[in-house]
């Protein structure tokens, strides 16, 4: 029985009755080919509709060819999109999930991965983040884009969708018109506040004229652009009040941030450890002042948070997008009183928005089935013969493999020489900004393990003889990696500390000098630098990359850069660790090969990792199928470990069959 009194009550938004208050906000999947969504996009959303979502707002759909944000943007203006909409609605209708299209034009925000189209905007004001300089739109072009919004809305209605959301958030085209910073026009679309609002007013009017009254139309807007000279909540309240007074607006979907700046873009998809549900106060203010239905998202990761927001009147619906990426069944679990079975979003951004920025299909570090639902649903549901599976290593890769193998009906044993599960996650637990991510992932794995038949043996190190005597049908090595120690002069100096040890030591004193050498540009060196700064050290971060935190997702990198500057950490790029002599510590310039001497009381090395391959080489012939995954295959990230944990198990039958055929 559900303990939620408000979250699972229906709500009427415009002409649409939505069965509960949980929505998935518009987010890119990259499952779009030549402007048309693929079957994988449909399967992705059907999975979440089956899981109990009340409303799905599809990813950005361009209303005009000049508004295609990337090469994988939906062409909402293309009449052929209606057929895909109908197919999607047919698939989700058994679950009573409503679907809106998001109507989008990025204006000056053009991030296409190949040929970059000319950017249009109200005025020639550059986008600092993307380095684009737009040209001012003519009045005829403005009218053409407004017509594109209207025709795209008509396509949505004709395709059976229940409504549309006009994207005015994050400094995209409508917001570029209503902001004084980006609109310097002196015609009827610029100058006064009323003139700057003309574009969005005429756009919504045109949409209503095209679709009729029996539809639902709202907007998405940033309550605060969170950047220098950006719009604030005070500005947004004024805009919302004016707009709802001028035209029918059925809802306002509140987000934050601005695409054109580093600091503002972070809020497009805020990462951990940013505060959860931090926009609820803004949505409450706009709901009161504009007297309109309000949605709010941004790090609402738990249905209990959603319940509090709805019950306190701060919003009418809550966007729990990332929560339903990692756990598509989250709404049903919550409504059925199975809250303890929900897997939480860890806020890493690596495979959801991270894949989008790498031009890859959507994924999830914690749920590697994401983005490939069609394949994995089929494979995981097939009947399998009884098999003994031994998994050595209880880190993220080994645990994902174990849980997948249990799901497929195998007899699974996991052994680890440590006294706790998690592997590298236990190091992350000690890091200031990675604690939430590691803690959430460990909780998720612990919860899943409790629901399985897996035999978990900690504090256990099996000898090769014991492994052979186990008589497993499949063995999966997931024994991780260890820090790389470069072969340079003075590397055994007592001042040298490997990255795996830095958070465990309590030797750092105020005003001591510490230098952190970074090989990869990932989180470890950043966390070590911040940790040392917290201890009062004077810290220098030296990276071999082109820029600091190069391997960290850009939104999380933005937060790290803020923390590094606030901690007064000196940052040096393009250098690596050259060794230690009696004269000091050497940095080597990677372009000129010049050596530079510095002095420090502590030298922290985060200069790569070595895979632990020794066990695999010893046991690789002790079962019909022996595989290695994660860092012991090659040191990479948790995403590769969990994905390989999943895919390796799904290949067990094929690999065993191949091995038996070879031995005939």
Image (cartoon, rainbow, N blue to C red):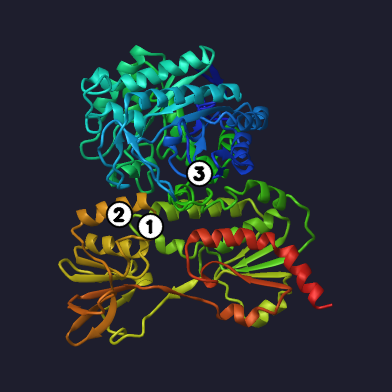
Left or right of 273 in this view: 213:
right
Instruction: Give the distance between the C-alpha atoms of the residues marked 2 and 1, in whole angstroms.
Output: 9 Å
Label at residue 481: none
* Residue 411 in view: yes
Quadrant housing the C terminus: bottom right
Q: Specify the quadrant of the image occupied by residue 18.
A: top right
- Please provide percent x and percent y for residue 550: 35, 60
> Which one is in front, 83 or 251?
83
Task: State which tag comes first along the sequence, 1 or 3.
Answer: 3
Residue holding disc 1 = 552
Q: Specify the quadrant of the image occupied by residue 240.
A: top left
* Residue 171 in view: no
Mark in the foreground, 1 or 3:
3
For the point 72% across and 62% down, the residue is 411
Task: State which tag comes first along the sequence, 2 or 1.
Answer: 1
Task: State which tag comes first along the sequence, 3 or 2.
Answer: 3
Element type at mark 1: loop
- Please provide percent x and percent y for residue 181: 22, 33
Residue holding disc 3 = 72
For the point 25% across and 64% down, the residue is 532
Label at residue 560: 2
Element type at mark 3: loop
Category of crowding for the residue at label 3, using alpha-carbon neighbours closer than 10 angstroms: few (below 14), some (14–19), many (at least 20): many
Q: Is residue 657 above or below residue 50?
A: below
For the point 56% across and 21% down, the residue is 157
- Please provide percent x and percent y for residue 436: 40, 51
C-beta proximity under 8 Å, tags 3 and 2:
no
- Please provide percent x and percent y for residue 249: 41, 17
């Amino acid at each position: 029985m559900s303990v939620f009194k408000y979250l699972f009550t229906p709500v009427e938004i415009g002409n649409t009755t939505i069965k509960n208050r949980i929505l998935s906000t518009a987010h890119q999947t990259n499952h779009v080919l030549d402007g048309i969504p693929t079957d994988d996009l449909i399967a992705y959303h059907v999975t979440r509709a089956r899981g109990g979502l009340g409303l799905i707002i599809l990813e950005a759909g361009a209303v005009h060819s000049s508004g295609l944000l990337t090469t994988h943007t939906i062409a909402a203006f293309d009449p052929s999109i209606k057929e895909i909409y109908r197919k999607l609605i047919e698939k989700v209708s058994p679950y009573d999930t409503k679907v809106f299209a998001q109507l989008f034009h990025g204006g000056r925000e053009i991030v296409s991965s190949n040929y970059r189209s000319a950017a249009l905007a109200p005025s020639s004001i550059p986008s600092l983040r993307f380095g684009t300089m737009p040209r001012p739109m003519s009045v005829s072009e403005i009218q053409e884009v407004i017509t594109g919004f209207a025709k795209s809305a008509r396509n949505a209605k004709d395709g059976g969708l229940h409504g549309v959301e006009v994207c005015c958030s994050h400094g995209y085209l409508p917001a570029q018109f209503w902001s004084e910073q980006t609109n310097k026009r002196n015609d009827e679309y610029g100058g006064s506040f009323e003139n700057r609002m003309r574009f969005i007013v005429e756009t919504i009017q045109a949409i209503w004229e095209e679709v009729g009254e029996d539809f639902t139309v709202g907007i998405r807007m940033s309550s605060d652009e969170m950047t220098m000279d950006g719009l604030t909540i005070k500005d947004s309240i004024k805009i919302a009040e004016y707009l709802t007074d001028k035209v029918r607006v059925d809802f306002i979907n509140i987000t934050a941030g601005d695409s054109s700046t580093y600091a503002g873009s972070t809020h497009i998809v805020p990462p951990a450890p940013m505060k959860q549900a931090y926009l609820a106060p803004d949505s409450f203010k706009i709901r009161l002042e504009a007297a309109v239905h309000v949605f709010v998202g941004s790090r609402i990761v738990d249905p209990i948070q959603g319940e509090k927001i709805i019950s306190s009147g701060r919003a009418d619906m809550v966007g729990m997008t990332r929560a339903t990426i990692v756990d598509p069944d989250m709404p049903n679990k919550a409504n059925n009183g199975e809250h303890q079975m929900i897997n939480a979003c860890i806020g890493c951004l690596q495979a959801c928005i991270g894949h989008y920025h790498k031009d890859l299909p959507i994924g999830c570090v914690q749920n590697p089935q994401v983005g490939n639902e069609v394949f994995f649903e089929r494979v995981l549901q097939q009947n399998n013969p009884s098999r003994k599976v031994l998994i050595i290593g209880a880190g993220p890769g080994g645990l994902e493999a174990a849980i997948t193998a249990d799901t497929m009906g195998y007899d699974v044993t996991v052994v680890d020489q440590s006294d706790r599960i998690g592997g590298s996650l236990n190091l992350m637990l000690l890091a200031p900004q990675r604690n939430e991510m590691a803690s959430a992932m460990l909780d998720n794995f612990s919860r899943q393990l409790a629901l399985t038949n897996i035999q978990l043996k900690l504090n256990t190190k099996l000898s090769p003889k014991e492994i052979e005597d186990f008589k497993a049908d499949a063995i999966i090595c997931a024994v991780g990696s260890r820090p790389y120690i470069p072969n340079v002069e003075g590397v055994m100096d007592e001042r040298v500390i490997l990255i795996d040890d830095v958070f465990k030591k309590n030797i750092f004193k105020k005003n001591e000098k510490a230098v952190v050498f970074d090989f990869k540009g990932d989180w470890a060196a950043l966390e070590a630098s911040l940790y040392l700064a917290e201890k009062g050290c004077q810290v220098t971060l030296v990276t071999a990359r082109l820029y600091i935190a190069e391997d960290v997702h850009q939104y999380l990198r933005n937060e790290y850069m803020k923390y590094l500057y606030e901690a007064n950490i000196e940052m040096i790029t393009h250098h690596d660790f050259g060794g230690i002599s009696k004269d000091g510590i050497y940095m080597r310039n990677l372009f000129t090969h010049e050596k530079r001497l510095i002095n420090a009381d502590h030298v922290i090395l985060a200069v790569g990792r070595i895979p632990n391959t020794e066990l695999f080489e010893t046991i690789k012939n002790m079962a019909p199928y022996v595989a290695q995954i994660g860092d012991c295959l090659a040191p990479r990230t948790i995403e590769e470990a969990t994905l390989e944990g999943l895919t390796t198990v799904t290949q067990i039958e094929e690999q065993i069959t191949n091995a038996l055929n070879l031995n005939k």
